[in-house]
Image: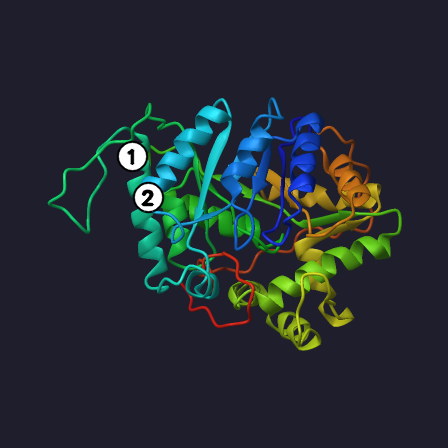
């Protein structure tokens, strides 16, 4: 493929600010299209993206994602418009409904009607970025104010969603869909469903950009690289409030998910295992091994996402990060792909069976959205 589109993202557990900035600078140098910086319960992504913007020249910078519970629509609009200026038009606003565990356990806010909350916030932020008065719903008698800086309606809004109702918000209101931990073989069918929803709801809207990819790690020792992605996979499926476990189970991997959860009774982002019987999950969610092996494993993703965005597990040593970025870069030459099975037909997805795709640092139930 001559015009591969590649991005790189991190997880909320990665809080080494110097490493984050260094990663973004290298991604810019290597020709990646987008750098996605998450926000969970650690770093505030806005000032970190500001630092990255001042040290990069070309790469687009995305908040991936900002929770609709952590900031008001007005604050989100101010942040987006300001970063739009700082980045010289390279900024992408990522929004999502997060999870019950994070919203209630960190923001002290009831996690009620998350899809409705997501729809309301996306609509209000768009209005403010377009220069319209603030849509007021709680104090309608107040005088609505406009954003006190130049409108920025061109700022793209990407929506993170996995649940049945939140993915409708992504399809109908988002410029892009940025799901996390979707099985490679499920992604094309799921994206097609979202595009059908979008065509029905907004036939004149621009096509929805699908931004997704595998957990990725490169090491000279393939077993070491596989251990890195296995630990992160085990953490996401065992300790993120159930949202990813339910999503992946709904994609046809329920038995493997339960096996992973059983093997990790005390999950940690730095410690975890994927049992041999659940290896299919790792093959679907991750790309790992030597540089050549990772290039081969990324090839099937080219048919699943518009921007194949690798996700770097937290805590990786710099030499692994550097090798991973170099191997997955858009200019890296892919080799032949022996031994990689073609994608199996995607099983029908009822637009998700999980939550909204956010993050949390405790094991707890999260209702489907």
Disc on res. 54:
none
Return the residue found at the far left.
141
In the rendered image, the quadrant that contains the C terminus is bottom left
Q: Which comes before the other along the chain, label 1 or label 2? A: 2
In the rendered image, the quadrant that contains the N terminus is top right
Q: Name the residue under label 2.
A: 73
Left or right: 330, with 238 as reference point: right
Chosen colour scheme:
rainbow
Query: Image height check: is 237 above or below 82?
Result: below
Give residue 111's quadrant in the image: bottom left
Left or right: 108, with 41 as reference point: left
Contact between marks 1 and 2 (CB within 8 A): the answer is: yes
Return the residue found at the far right.
221
Q: How crowded is mark 2: few (under 14 residues within 10 Å), some or many (20 or more)?
A: many
Q: Where is residue 317 in the image (x, y as percent from the top left)?
A: 78, 47
Observer able to see residue 283: yes
Q: Position of residue 177 (x, y in %)?
A: 48, 44
Q: Nearer the viewer, residue 190 or 14?
A: 14
Q: Nearer the viewer, residue 321 or 192?
A: 321
Q: Which residue is drawn at 51% across and 64% down?
A: 243
Q: Residue at x 65, y 36 (%)?
A: 21
Q: Which of 189 and 326 is in front in this view?
A: 326
Q: Tell me the distance, in whole angstroms, between the alpha carbons under discs 1 and 2.
A: 8 Å
Q: Which residue is drawn at 48% across and 34% down?
A: 92
Q: Where is residue 228 in the image (x, y as percent from the top left)?
A: 76, 56
Left or right: 110, with 159 as reference point: left
Give residue 49's quadrant in the image: top right
Q: Position of residue 106 (x, y in %)?
A: 46, 61
Q: Nearer the viewer, residue 251 or 144?
A: 144
Query: Image height check: is 112 above or below 15?
Result: below
Q: Mark 1 points at which residue?
A: 128
């Amino acid at each position: 493929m001559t015009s591969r589109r590649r991005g790189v993202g991190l997880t909320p557990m990665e809080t080494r600010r110097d490493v984050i900035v260094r990663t973004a600078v290298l991604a810019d140098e290597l020709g990646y299209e987008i750098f996605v910086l998450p926000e969970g319960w650690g770093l505030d992504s806005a000032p970190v993206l500001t630092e990255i913007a001042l040290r990069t020249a070309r790469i687009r910078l995305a908040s991936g994602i900002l929770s609709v519970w952590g900031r008001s629509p007005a604050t989100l609009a101010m942040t987006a418009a300001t970063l739009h200026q700082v980045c010289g038009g390279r900024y992408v606003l990522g929004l999502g409904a997060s999870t019950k565990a994070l919203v209630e356990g960190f923001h002290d806010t009831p996690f009620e009607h998350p899809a409705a909350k997501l729809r309301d916030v996306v609509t209000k932020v768009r209005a403010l970025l377009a220069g319209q008065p603030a849509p007021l719903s709680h104090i309608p008698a107040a005088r609505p104010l406009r954003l006190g800086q130049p409108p920025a309606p061109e700022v793209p809004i990407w929506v993170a969603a996995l649940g049945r109702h939140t993915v409708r918000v992504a399809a109908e209101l988002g410029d892009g869909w940025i799901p996390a931990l979707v099985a490679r073989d499920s992604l094309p069918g799921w994206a097609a469903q979202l595009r059908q929803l979008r065509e029905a709801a907004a036939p004149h809207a621009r096509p929805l950009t699908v931004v997704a990819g595998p957990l990725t790690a490169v090491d000279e020792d393939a077993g070491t690289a596989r251990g890195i992605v296995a630990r992160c996979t085990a953490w996401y499926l065992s300790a993120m409030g159930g949202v990813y476990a339910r999503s992946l189970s709904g994609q046809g991997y329920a038995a493997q998910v339960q096996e992973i959860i059983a093997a990790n009774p005390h999950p940690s982002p730095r410690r975890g295992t994927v049992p041999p019987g659940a290896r299919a999950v790792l093959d679907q969610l991750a790309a790992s091994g030597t540089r050549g092996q990772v290039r081969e494993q990324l090839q099937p993703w080219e048919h699943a996402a518009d921007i194949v965005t690798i996700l770097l597990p937290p805590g990786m040593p710099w030499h692994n990060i550097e090798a991973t970025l170099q191997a997955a870069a858009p200019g890296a030459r892919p080799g032949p792909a022996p031994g990689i099975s073609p994608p199996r037909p995607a099983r029908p997805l009822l637009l998700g069976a999980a939550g909204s795709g956010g993050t949390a640092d405790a094991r707890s139930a999260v209702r489907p959205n």
